[in-house]
Amino acid sequence: MEREDAHAEIARLRAEIARHNHLYYAAAAPELEDEAYDALVRELQAWETRFPGLAAPDSPTAVVGGAPDARFPSAPHSRPMISLQNSYDAAEVSAFDARVRRELGVPVVVYTVEPKIDGVAVALRYAEGELAQGLTRGDGRQGDVITDNLGALTEIPTRLPDDWRDLFPGRAPRAVELRGEAFLRLDRFQALNGEREAAGLAPFANPRNATAGTLKTLDVEVVRRRRLSVRFYQLFPLDDAVEPATHSAELAAIRRLGLPAQDFLETATDAAGLIASLDRLAARRASLGYQIDGAVIKVDERRWQAALGETAKTPRWGLAYKYAAETARTRLERIVLQVGRTGVITPVAVLTPVPLAGTTVARATLHNWEEIARKDVRIGDTVIVARGGDVIPKVVSVVPEARTGAEQPFPPPVACPVCATPAVRRPDEVAWRCPNPFCPAVAAGRLRHFVGRDACDITGLGERGIELFLELDLVRGPADLLRLRRDQLAGLPGWGEKSADKLIASLGRARERPWAAKIFALGLPGVGTATAATLAGRFATIDALRAATAPELCALPDIGEVVAGEIGNFLASPEGAALLDDFAAAGFWKAREHVPPPPEPGSTPLDGQTYVLTGTLVALTRAEAKRSLETLGAKVTGSVSRRTTAVVAGADPGGKLDDAVRLGVPVLDEAGLRRLLAGGEGDHAG
């Protein structure tokens, strides 16, 4: 029975961690602080250690990152892009130093200390000095190809300086890889949120979420306008050329290329020196101009890094030291309720304003009533608030000894604070909801979501316009927007013929939006832009999506059991059905929104095969060749590995041909490619 209990607990933890991975990597909307997430992973690790027969190679304890994004092609990493083990106190830093010296058998080790930017890890490959490919971390083994988006960042060069080969002693490499962290500077983040609020859009929660969403947008111009920054921390050749002997030398080489590296770098030779460096970096934290959530500690010598090795998930030669969130003490004056577009009622603490992390904090989220009960939060309490990356800080705890007896508990809501509909709580949820789909707060939230850039991209309708339409009862839901007439709009206060024409034209284009954008516009629970694209690739019509079963949804990439259940429940609910029917009546859906879904794996001639294109093709362009190969089920990537099926080499091939020869990967000439596409096996060139 104990093993059965362990199996159930492991399954629960894996599902919970998978949900948080989806929120962090795919939806860019994390709910947990890093320390709470790490605690879940450590709990799972303890169970798997106790019951090793229940461990699995795809467990969150063994893999990094999230599932691939279906909107982007993927490619393998040249080296695993693993993550550092997290540490939260000085004792763990001392233990790390002791273990490293013990395993290396040396009395002194040189370490580097640098900021851990709270951003998004990226990898860039340069062939003959030209930017050839840009990847996300992905699951650590392969990442999403976002070359164009990364190329839009001004700090990422499309070509390295002419003397880049001089950085490597001996034989110069033909290709190199740079790794770094993309992020938003705080001034840019504040400016972007100001622009979004002026346009009636919800502000980004924090710089990290904004960065992740920007890098995964399908519009390069959006990436260019948002002006992300990057700091590089790794440089290595993609062949057997000699790489820098130390991490310090590696960072110096990056700077010699004229590329941005870390603003803070110190070395230390023992635990005391490491902790002193961590303290100095913490003192500079507020002046860096961008968010860091800690520091990165690395063994400096490459040869010692190699000797220490790494696990499947983390290197044994590095450690991420996480700073505690900045906190302040203040009084909780009252609690107000906010109602979101899905009807969830959220309690928000109104505080006596207090300076914290460079700003004045007057509000803090209380999450839900389960959290209020767990922390025993009462109106009038003296509370500790923390501000990490979120726009709205969190109430961490209360100060019981400061109570006077006048503090008042805050019970769950009896009714919606906006429309007075009795509040409900579903059996499987902690949240209280307003079940009224026509609640003005729910309606306003859905309208804001529907008109957003990643949804139907309606220009000419901001927050004030939405409030006016609801106040005048012109609309009750997003489908009503599609029924608006020019004469209704032109006579509204503050409107005229030009603004009416602009909105009507934009609403007309909404019916022609990409299928994935239409799905995202519905505001399905748990569905971000990446998940919407996954659903769009599997279901060709709204009727097919409505008929989707839980097993069908669970089988899709980046959709786990929890998200599948939320989608299914919403589609089957009366309010969900009414929303979709209303869209149908407004002519929003097409008979077929996209081409039929791709064939099942194994049903196409080249399913499971991977090809790389290099050089100039004569009979067809590289883009045409790529489309033809993908139509037959093949994957076309930008780099050669031992898993590559074949390299297609046209005239004047680049270093990919050399890589194929070195790795023993078959090579096709253009005639062989044509035979392959025509149904033959394809002859190897040379």
Image (cartoon, rainbow, N blue to C red):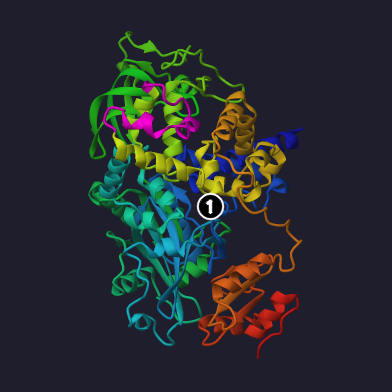
Outermost residue toward the front?
487
Q: Is residue 488 magenta?
A: yes
Q: Which quadrant: the N terminus? A: top right
Q: Is residue 563 above or below residue 121?
A: above
Quick check: can you spot residue 98?
yes
Indicate the quadrant where residue 324 lies: top left
Q: Check disc 1 and report the residue beneath it.
A: 65
Outermost residue toward the bottom?
686
Q: Which quadrant: the C terminus? A: bottom right
Q: Is residue 14 magenta?
A: no
Q: Position of residue 478 (x, y in %)?
A: 48, 32
**Relative to the observer, which residue lies in front, 442 or 43?**
442
Q: Is residue 425 above or below residue 166?
A: above
Residue drawn at (61%, 85%), measured in percent from left and top? 661
Q: Position of residue 456 (x, y in %)?
A: 46, 43
Amino acid residing under circle 1: Gly
Range covered by the magenta-colored residues: 471-495
**Relative to the observer, which residue lies in front, 461 or 122?**
461
Label 1 neighbour load within 10 Å: few <14, some 14-19, many 20+:
many
Q: Position of residue 347 (x, y in %)?
A: 41, 22
Q: Secondary structure at mark 1?
A: loop
Q: Is residue 16 above or below residue 252?
A: above
Q: Position of residue 369 (x, y in %)?
A: 47, 20
Horizontally, residue 156 falls left or right of residue 600, namely left
Indicate the quadrant where residue 685 lies: bottom right
